[in-house]
């Protein structure tokens, strides 16, 4: 598993032409990548996945901040051009999907939730796909091809190694106008040549035999037993429809172990969405990222049980948007339609899990792993949303069911 950061070249052509026609300075080129990935090698073939968050440089106009970001989920297939050893050179290609958020907003100065709900419009937010409603609400078809280079550095006292990584290549959206919003194409925000550097934790084949250690990637579906009751009361008081149901979503878990010590990372998003009024929609989204560590209590053939403790980060974002906004350039000239509130802080969780591995080949080189995870999230920050404490919403019990591949 690995983390990388890098830059991708991109020119937001159509929007920059709009700015240029108005005598304004165009937005700067390029965006920054933050990526988390997992890959596994079987003989000379590479399988993996990558989750990326990309943020563009901010621009300012007449008190408004223009900003954009994209999220991508990619599946990687590659071939190693080197023999098993400390140095690896991999040629790969990826396919996947993503989410695009482009916004032009003034700073929200209200510290009172009711005041905000009575007058939330302080700019516009455009989205293609909407992961704020659901993790699987992605849009468009994305591809990427490139080279992945890594070198393993031994870690004193451990059989794992630190992998130093460099990646370069080109990402693009092959379908024309697949990222067109309100009359302007944002296709270039999902395209461009990239260069990334990073580091990761790897289990070198030359240090291990099967069952000595493992590192697996798991997709999980989680149900969280909480609801935004305090926020719903304010929504109703201000003539808006409340959120219904419990937040449940899909997430990514990477979990490894060596010498009975377990470690890993979780990524998931609690999303709620629906109609706020006849002309508006709203979402309540919370992204969680945890670093986990723990122990295995039972390892009986293919059945495993253990406990994990996680420490991480959480945010909470409430967004209210008009369903029908005009196209550019009118939207740029009359931008006040949407608004959002945001807060963030620290999170912790204890977790118990049980997994069952099903060997997928005769050599037992990799398993299909089915699992159940139960725990309790603890909010370590007050999570004040315009003066309203959302601590009770963030602290909740949960149940997750996972399926993954482990080598």
Image (cartoon, rainbow, N blue to C red):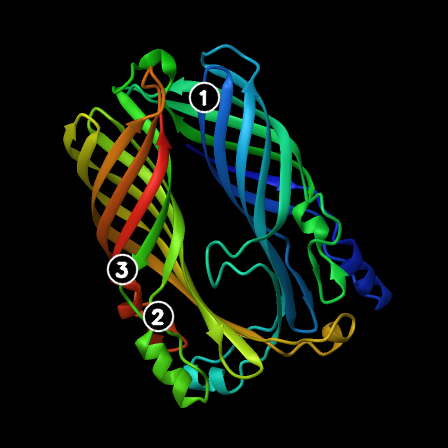
The location of residue 332, given as percent across then percent down, is 73, 72
- Residue matched to label 3: 380
Q: Give the secondary structure at mark 1.
A: strand
Q: Residue at x 37, y 74 (%)?
A: 244
Question: Height in image: 284 above or below 324?
Answer: above
- Residue matched to label 1: 41
- Going from the N terminus, do you reach mark 1 or mark 3 first? 1
Quarter that holds the C terminus: top left
Residue 245, labelled with which disc?
A: 2
Say left or right for 97 vs 306: right
Residue 252, labelled with which disc?
A: none
Q: Are the two marked residues, 2 and 1, in contact with CB atoms closer than 8 angstroms?
A: no
Question: Height in image: 55 above or below 330?
Answer: above
Q: Are the two marked residues, 2 and 3, in contact with CB atoms closer than 8 angstroms?
A: no
Q: Give the secondary structure at mark 2.
A: loop
Q: Give the secondary structure at mark 3.
A: loop
| Picture mark count | 3
- Going from the N terminus, do you reach mark 2 or mark 1 first? 1
């Amino acid at each position: 598993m690995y983390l990388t950061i890098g830059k991708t070249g991109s020119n937001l052509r159509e929007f920059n032409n709009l700015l240029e026609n108005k005598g304004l300075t165009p937005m700067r080129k390029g965006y920054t990548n933050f990526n988390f990935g997992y890959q596994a090698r079987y003989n000379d073939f590479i399988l993996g996945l990558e989750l990326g968050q990309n943020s563009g440089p901010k621009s300012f106009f007449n008190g408004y901040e223009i900003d954009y970001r994209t999220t991508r989920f990619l599946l990687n297939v590659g071939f190693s051009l080197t023999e098993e050893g400390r140095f690896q050179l991999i040629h790969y290609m990826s396919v996947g999907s993503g989410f695009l958020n482009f916004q032009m907003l003034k700073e929200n100065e209200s510290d009172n939730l009711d005041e905000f709900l009575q007058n939330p419009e302080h700019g516009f937010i455009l989205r293609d796909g909407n992961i704020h409603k659901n993790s699987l609400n992605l849009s468009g078809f994305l591809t990427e091809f490139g080279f992945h280079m890594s070198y393993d550095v031994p870690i004193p006292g451990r059989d794992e190694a630190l992998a130093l990584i460099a990646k370069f290549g080109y990402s693009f959206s092959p379908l024309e106008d697949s990222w067109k919003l309100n009359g302007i194409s944002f296709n270039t925000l999902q395209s461009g040549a990239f260069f990334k550097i990073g580091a990761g934790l790897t289990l070198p084949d030359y240090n291990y035999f099967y069952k000595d250690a493992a590192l697996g990637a798991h997709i999980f579906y989680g149900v969280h037993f909480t609801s935004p009751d305090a926020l719903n009361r304010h929504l109703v008081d201000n003539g808006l429809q409340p959120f219904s149901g419990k937040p449940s979503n899909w997430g990514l878990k990477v979990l490894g172990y060596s010498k009975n010590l377990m470690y890993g990372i979780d990524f998931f998003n609690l999303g709620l969405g629906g109609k706020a009024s006849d002309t508006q929609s709203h979402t309540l989204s919370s992204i969680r990222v945890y670093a986990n560590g723990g122990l295995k209590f039972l390892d009986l053939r293919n059945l495993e049980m253990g406990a994990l403790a996680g420490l991480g980060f959480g945010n909470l974002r409430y967004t209210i948007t008009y369903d029908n906004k005009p196209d550019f350039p009118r939207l740029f000239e009359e931008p006040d339609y949407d608004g959002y509130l945001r807060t963030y802080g620290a999170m912790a969780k204890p977790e118990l899990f049980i997994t069952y591995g099903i060997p997928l080949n005769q050599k037992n080189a990799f398993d299909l792993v089915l699992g159940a995870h139960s725990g309790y999230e603890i909010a370590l920050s007050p999570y004040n949303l315009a003066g309203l404490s959302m601590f009770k919403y963030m602290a909740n019990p949960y149940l997750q069911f996972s399926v993954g591949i482990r080598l």
